[in-house]
Image (cartoon, rainbow, N blue to C red):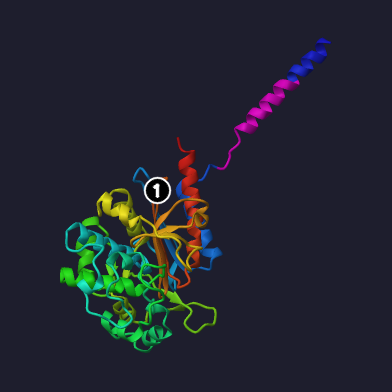
Amino acid sequence: MKKILLVTIILSLLAMNFMSCSDDSPTEPEPTLAEKLQEALDNGLEAYNGIGISAAVIMPDGEIWVGVSGVSHGTTAITSDMPFAAGSIAKNFTATTILQLAEEGELTLEDSLYEWLPAYPYVDSTITIRQLLNHTSGLYDFVDNPDFWNAIFEEPSKVWTPEEMILAFNRESVFPKGTDWNYSTLGYALLRMIIKKITGSEISTVNRNRFWIPLGLANTFTSMGEALPANTAHGWWDLDGDGTYDDFFPWPRTAFASGIAGEVFSTAEDLAKWSQALFHNLSVLSQQSLDQMLTFHSPCTGEEFICAGYGLGAVKYQPELFNGLEAYGHSGNAPGYAAACLYLPDYDVCFGFTDNTEEGDAVLTVADLLSIITSHLEETP
């Protein structure tokens, strides 16, 4: 009996020793947040057939993560200081300028167009500035006009005035003002014309003096009026419809940029910094003005899948896009590029994303990146 007991004790001790040795065996360390984000970025580039992307996150404590993946062109890798065209994110800058001018007493959001601009065909001069800002003006979106793109490609170096664009490509309004919602690039061209009339400056000067310099957005530019740096990321577009992207960068952007009167190039990090300044730090607008910007009109007819509501130059996104997360800001496409600038109010997270393809499918990677970030914050004491 004693021998059996002794053998049992010995076997138990050996088992415990074996288990102890097993516990001491080397294990794979848990990936850091930065490693998880970079892996998701790389996977997204591959999964969505991207060419080059960049993302930036500003965490609630101010810590910044910036990641890049892919190339600009050839073997030239994307770097964090490479500007990409930000597309319709420029509307957010324009709307912010208008709200600042309202704070300064230069205009009111209820002013009608006739108080600032001459009459144009198919433009109801009683449309208000607020209706231009939130796309309830009913104005036609002239970038939907095939003649617009034909003109852009036929003479890519031509400088268009906004007035010329309106006269050449505008069409009848799609509904009477204030009765529905329709995204309109024309509306924002008119707003930039108002800004120029009030300030006496080109939009490039307005953007630089009001935003780029004060906020330290060192890698953000207005393509008309400011020289783009040599390291600007090349944009890619399927020009001949063969299913393969072509390098669009050698094409002059003059006709497009002058036509919309305010194309912006930026980096993912600068877009995240802009989100932080505008939505979190309140260093750009007063709380009252920001509240107006974030008063969202819904439904966004024709954009319901993406847009849960549209404010004054700001989008509230459908939560389903980002795994149930509330997010607002703005996104955009431009010839050869796509971008997003977001704020997550429930987590105080600021986010920027850039893509150098026209379709911008890699922007779907944003959902994975945000999921990783919010899971990390929920798990961190």
The residue drawn where x is 50% and y is 49% is 372
Q: Residue at x 68, y 24 (%)?
A: 16
Judge the density around disc 1: few (<14), some (14-19), many (≥20) Cα neighbours within 10 Å: some
Camera sees residue 64: yes
Q: Quadrant of the N terminus?
A: top right
Q: How many marks?
A: 1
Q: Position of residue 268 (x, y in %)?
A: 37, 60
Q: Residue furthest top?
A: 2
Q: Any magenta on residue 213?
A: no
- Residue under numbered circle 1: 345
The main secondary structure of the magenta stretch is: helix
Of residues 343 and 83, the one nearer the viewer is 343
Extreme-right residue of the structure: 1
- Residue 291 placement (x, y as % from top left): 31, 52
Going by the picture, which residue comes out furthest to the bottom?
154
Q: Nearer the viewer, residue 121 or 21?
A: 121
Could you say where residue 89 lies in the image, as x and y percent from the top left?
35, 65
The C terminus lies in quadrant: top left
Residue closer to the observer: 78 or 130: 130
| Displayed quadrant of residue 331 | bottom left
Give the answer, above or below, for where 320 lies relative to 140.
above
Location of residue 56 in the rendering, given as x and y in whole percent from the top left corner: 39, 55
Q: Measured along the vertical axis of the image, is residue 241 above or below residue 363?
A: below
Q: Which span is picked out in magenta?
A: 11-28
Residue 283 sits above or below residue 175 on the image = above
Give the amino acid type for the residue marked by disc 1 in the picture.
Pro
Asked whether residue 26 is drawn in magenta, I would say yes
- Does any portion of residue 249 appear in the rendered image? no
Q: Secondary structure at mark 1?
A: loop
